[in-house]
């Protein structure tokens, strides 16, 4: 599932060192969805996360 989580992170727009961070969060949550990855990505980037 690690590779799948990385692919989801890429699909959400993660770049560089964001990819393993997002993948790790997806693996931890066991939620492998682009919307969840985008939410985590916004949090990492310091943007206000809207649902």
Image (cartoon, rainbow, N blue to C red):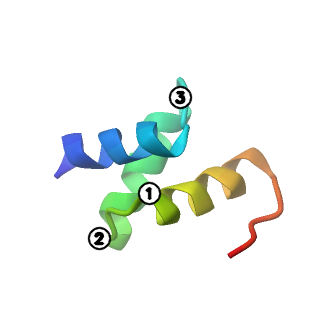
Check contact, mark 1 vs mark 2: CB within 8 A: no
Question: Nearer the N terminus, badge 2 or badge 3?
Answer: 3
- The x and y percentages for residue 33 are 38, 63
Horizontal side of 21 relative to 48 (left or right) equals left
* Disc 3 secondary structure class: loop
Tag 1 residue:
34
Q: If the image is split into quadrants, where does the C terminus sit?
A: bottom right
Q: Which mark is residue 21?
A: none
Q: How far apart are marks 2 and 3 (CA)?
A: 20 Å
Tag 3 residue:
17
Residue 24 versus residue 8: which sits nearer the camera? 8
Q: Going by the picture, which residue comes out furthest to the left?
A: 1
Question: Viewer-nearest of labels 3 and 1?
Answer: 1
* Disc 2 secondary structure class: loop
Horizontal side of 48 relative to 36 (left or right) equals right
Up the image or down, 43 lies above or below 20; here it is below
Question: Nearer the N terminus, badge 3 or badge 1?
Answer: 3
Residue drawn at point x = 49 percent, y = 65 percent: 36
- The x and y percentages for residue 45 are 74, 45
Crowding near the residue tagged with mark 2, few <14, some 14–19, many ≥20 C-alpha atoms within 10 Å: few
Up the image or down, 49 lies above or below 44; here it is below
- The x and y percentages for residue 39 are 61, 62
Residue drawn at point x = 43 percent, y = 59 percent: 25
Q: Going by the picture, which residue comes out furthest to the top?
A: 16
Residue drawn at point x = 36 percent, y = 47 percent: 8
Q: Residue 30 carries which label?
A: 2
């Amino acid at each position: 599932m690690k590779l799948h989580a990385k692919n989801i992170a890429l699909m959400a727009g993660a770049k560089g060192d964001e990819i393993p961070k997002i993948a790790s969060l997806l693996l931890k949550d066991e939620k492998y969805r682009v919307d969840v990855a985008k939410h985590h990505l916004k949090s990492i980037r310091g943007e206000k996360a809207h649902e």
